[in-house]
Amino acid sequence: MKDRTVLFSFLFLAIALIISAVFWYSRAEPNSRRVTFNREIAPIIFSHCASCHRPEESAPFSLLSYGDVVDRAEQIVEVTESRYMPPWLPKSGYGHFSGDRRLSQDEIDLLADWVAQGAIEGDPDDLPEAPSFVAGWQLGEPDLVIDMPETYRLRADGSDVFHNFVLPIPNTTSRFVRAVELRPSNRQIVHHANMLTDSTGAARKLDRQEPGPGYAGMENLGVASRPSGHFLSWKVGSVPFAGYPEKAWRVDPGSDLVVNMHMLPSGKIEEVRAKVGIYFSEKVPSDPSLALIQLEADRQLDIPAGEKQHVVTDRFTLPVDVDVLAIYPHAHLLGQDLQGYALLPDGRKEWLIWIDDWDWNWQAVYRYRQPLSLPRGTELVMQYTFDNSASNPRNPHQPPRRVTAGNRTEDEMAHLWIQVLPQSQDDLHVLNEVKARHQLSKYPRKSEQKISLGLALANQGKIDQAAHVFREATSLNPQHVGAHYNLACMRSLLGKTPEAKEAFRAVLKMDPDHVESHNNLAIILFNEGKLESAVEHYRHALRLRPQFAIAHNNLGLALQRMGKLEEAAIHYRRALKLRPDYEVASQRLKKVELELQGENQ
């Protein structure tokens, strides 16, 4: 009996110990548990890594299976503990962005524990379903795909290459674009790319002047531009943006997409091609349009060799209320600490972004989860710190050298682009004026900044002031076609017809193929009753740009006045085919058709 009692006592004790162990195991910290790939690690990898680490994407290897991950397990622990991967530069709590790829400390610890415990695969039933991705195009099948007409051969050696590729957009009518997605063929040598638009044919002309595809230079050489307020760019690891359907930008027939690529020679000749997917919106854009505010401090970038903390700043005061939608900080290899914040009129400080360990390889446009509303009078501040010491592992020069501003990787830049939405279109024009004046305060002799100011003034009806600014631009650069053309337009709006006519003729002397000047000179000749001369200039404009809907409409009116009704109707119809919403052409066509019906009765 005594032995049986002792036996039961041992059994009860054993059961109690087991229950206690289970209880305390369930209460234990995660790092004391048995971590498996299928249960704990796969969800982390699928959520934070697989979007890039899969076939045909930017990462050099796939991480979609246990075998893929276990082969690189120690490397994964190393790059996640250092927070090199997944790439996410903004500091936590200083701006709340969509698409945050940052790992929590618990997730980083789980990865380390998994490797320390032997990288166990675990129960197959615990494995979550692998993520599904769209094959190829990340935004889904595009409405239109355009390819580079030719393959570009990048030289083997030397410094950075900036090259512009002109891709005709084959649309037969005006459409509204909400998004574009670029897919370069050789992502190892393309650092980034910006996309711009040109409806004038000027980019094509530059393309024809150089052998091979495209033309050299940084960005656009003054002929192409960003659609108002939009970031159209591609960077390694960045997820393409689906756009704002109600803020889409219009692309007219005959327009070109200009893809400016920044490429880095690899030591051998490389072939580069790219295609672009275009996604249209059926919504007519609503006012106001988006705007980009640029803070930059390139003039302050003269960084002595060995200087560890070189600080540069820029400030911009908002003249109107805005909502901030996205932000894009940019520096090169010496960038270290990048801060952007807003000082509100009531004295409060609102962080826009803070990157305390900048990495040039992983720059991106960051979009806010919710727009930030900033009132008029808010001061936007950019403060960047650069490290040109030998202790900076990213310094391209050892020993360090003096570094100044420039486009090359070994040069430096200090830019902060902020995408905003004003309250109204009038506010947008006010904002554009203040932006242009801000840039002119730094670069008072830049014709392009003068032209930006002149256009902003003209959009507010300040024609006299705009004319004065454009006149200053022509003085700064007597051969600047755009400055002379805009001055001619202002003279026309001011009723100074003889001066306007001579100014348009002067533009055509500098550039005989300037389509807009042919059209505008024809308007003056038409109003003077010189219909034959007007028709000649309209026809010249249309030979240069057959998709120019305004010139078709204007030619139709001139032909109508000359009694050539059938030909006039042809040009009105062409204008409407190109721009279905062209109300003036529609009304004139109806009138001509009634006149033709009367003749036939």
Image (cartoon, grey):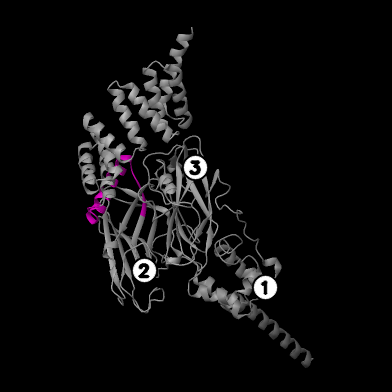
Q: CA distance from mark 1 to mark 3?
A: 50 Å
Residue shown at 45% from the left, 66% from the top: 361
Other residues around mark 2 within 10 Å, as few (<14) / some (14–19) / many (≥20): many
Would residue 556 be found to the left or right of residue 402 on screen? right
Residue flagged by tag 3: what amino acid is it? Ile
Residue 530, image x and y in percent? 30, 22
Residue flagged by tag 1: what amino acid is it? Glu
Residue shown at 52% from the left, 44% from the top: 279
Q: Along the line of sight, which residue is nearer the eye, 486 or 27?
A: 486
Is the Cβ of the residue at disc 1 closer than 8 Å to that at disc 3? no
The disc at residue 131 is none
The disc at residue 169 is 3
Q: Along the line of sight, which residue is nearer the eye, 318 or 517?
A: 517
Residue 287, image x and y in percent? 37, 39
Residue 342, compared with residue 522, is above or below; it is below
Residue 241 colored in magenta in the image = no
What is the secondary structure assignment of the residue under circle 3? loop
Q: CA distance from mark 1 to mark 2?
A: 41 Å
What is the secondary structure assignment of the residue under circle 2? strand
Q: Label 2 belongs to which residue?
A: 335
Residue 136, compared with residue 553, is above or below; it is below
Q: Label 1 belongs to which residue?
A: 121
Mark positioned earlier in the residue sequence (1 or 2): 1
Magenta range is: 418-445
What is the secondary structure assignment of the residue under circle 1? loop
Would residue 173 be found to the left or right of residue 55 on screen? left
Residue 498, image x and y in percent? 22, 29
Residue shown at 32% from the left, 35% from the top: 517
Would residue 375 be found to the left or right of residue 87 on screen? left
Mark whose residue sits in front, 1 or 2? 2
Residue 436 colored in magenta in the image = yes
